[in-house]
Amino acid sequence: MTFVRRNVWQLGGDWSDPVLWYARGVAALKSRPLDDATSWRFYGAIHGIDPGLWRRLGYLLPSDRIPGAPVTSRFWQQCQHGSWYFLPWHRGYVLSFEALVRDAVMKAGGPEDWALPYWNYFKPNESALPPAFASPNWPDGQGDNPLFVAQRYGPYNDGNVHVPVAMINLNALGDPDFTGSGNGGSPGFGGIDTGFAHSGAVHGGVEAQPHDLVHGLVGGEDPATQLPGLMSDPDTAGLDPIFWLHHCNIDRLWEVWRQDRTHADPTDSRWIKGPASIGQRAFSMPLLGGKVWDYVPGDVRDIAKLGYRYDDLSPTIASTVLAQRVQRLGADVAPAGATQGGASVASDKDVELVGASTAPVPIVGSDIHTSVKLDAGVRSKVQSSLSAAPRVAKPDRVFLDLENVRGLSDATALQVYVGLPDGADPAAHPDRLAGSIALFGVRKASATGGEHAGSGLTFVLDISQVVDTLHLGHDLDVDQLGVRIVPVRPVPENAGISIGRISIVRQGG
């Protein structure tokens, strides 16, 4: 049997049968104690757990029995973020969870072909939280709907939970490389080459956007206590039932990316065989009947072999990002060696610093102004690569790196603009938007005793199109390039958000 994951907004109603059965399955898992490896909270802790935060949010009680160290060290705190394992680990995680819910559905008399729906917030009129998740009541008006959680505050912390589509994008689908570089250039579609990374510093393309943004925008934070919404923090995200529909969509986007014949998953044995092959933690999921599934990325590359599919694999990439840039920059033909269907933009790992800020940048308030001092020689290399003269090489890709971002608020979301005219309203210049980021995981990444000794997160924004616009408008020949950071919500000083350095790099021509 092949299980079909379908769009939650197109199932035939707010409380369609698949959604109603999901709610019943979630209720069954929530009724199990924490130390039951097939329970709702146990599976939430697989993604991440902060006992203090769980207690404050009401998800860890004095009466709960905590599993012993052999169990927690094998299963808990396992999610892969800032890692080239982000996509395969989450695929196995979602697949295992789906099997638990399906078993509960069938025991309650539900269909044996039940599958998780996905939430495609990119579809017109489908960016709002699906209604069954927004009401505390079951469809008969009775309370205790297990799909509803109070700790969802939305992008503006007003309880209106939706995904503002202007803040998210599918740009990662145009990246030809699954694996990126960790030296300031493209992080790739799937992330940089790492070992086991529960809280890695650099998030891959599809992880940063839309994955992180949707987490932060849906979760928000409690305006009264500044506690995060469940979706906003990796240590609580797995407790929210909408998490699983969001991750089905991210998993679906991996399949969309793979539809392009020029795109391919890594062939490196360390990726295929997983971190256990180099002496690190295995990916390990508890299953029904006390069984355990240890898996590696190579086991989960082919969803047909895993027994499921998606009802829709759109959008497709109609033309290459490279071809679009070449046309915009005034050349008649694509450079030699370019291929069709989303092929290489500038996949070379030759990265050179164009410029950097001179001091850390605190993020407080609603509008932060700073600038990056440019090296004239490297800037002219970029300008030369963008020239419309007969082209012998690909135009440079240019990236804005926000390095060593630290803080206490994972719910913080920022819009970043480059090269705005003095006094300009950022909203009036979408062509200068470098990108939107959410600080999903920043609290853990800032902990001095954590995985990276408090070095924080680094965000890599592809600003090639912004630089193209500046070049064509003769606005790139400057010593300093202005950067404006506009938080989605004003950032209080006690959130402790700061950027260690802002840099601009060119990658391969």
Image (cartoon, rainbow, N blue to C red):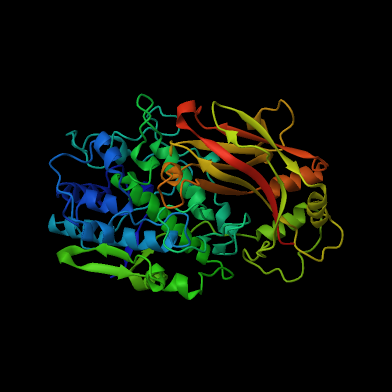
Looking at the rendered structure, the number of numbered marks drawn on it comes to: 0
In the rendered view, tell whether residue 501 sits above or below residue 194.
above
Horizontal and vertical percent for residue 444?
A: 41, 45
Q: Quadrant of the C terminus?
A: bottom right
Horizontal and vertical percent for residue 457?
A: 51, 47
- Tell me where residue 155 sits by quadrant: top left
Horizontal and vertical percent for residue 330?
A: 81, 54
Give the residue displayed 61% in from the left and 37% down from the top. 360
Any part of residue 302 in sight: yes
Residue 331 lies left or right of residue 45; in this view the side is right
Any part of residue 128 in sight: no
Query: 340 and 222: which one is in front?
Result: 222
Residue 477 lies left or right of residue 319; in this view the side is right
Horizontal and vertical percent for residue 407?
A: 47, 37
- Tell me where residue 304 sits by quadrant: bottom left
Q: Quadrant of the N terminus?
A: bottom left
- Tell me where residue 500 sits by quadrant: top right
Q: Going by the picture, which residue comes out furthest to the right?
A: 389
Give the residue displayed 79% in from the left and 49% down from the top. 379
Residue 430 lies left or right of residue 129; in this view the side is right
Residue 99 lies left or right of residue 219; in this view the side is left
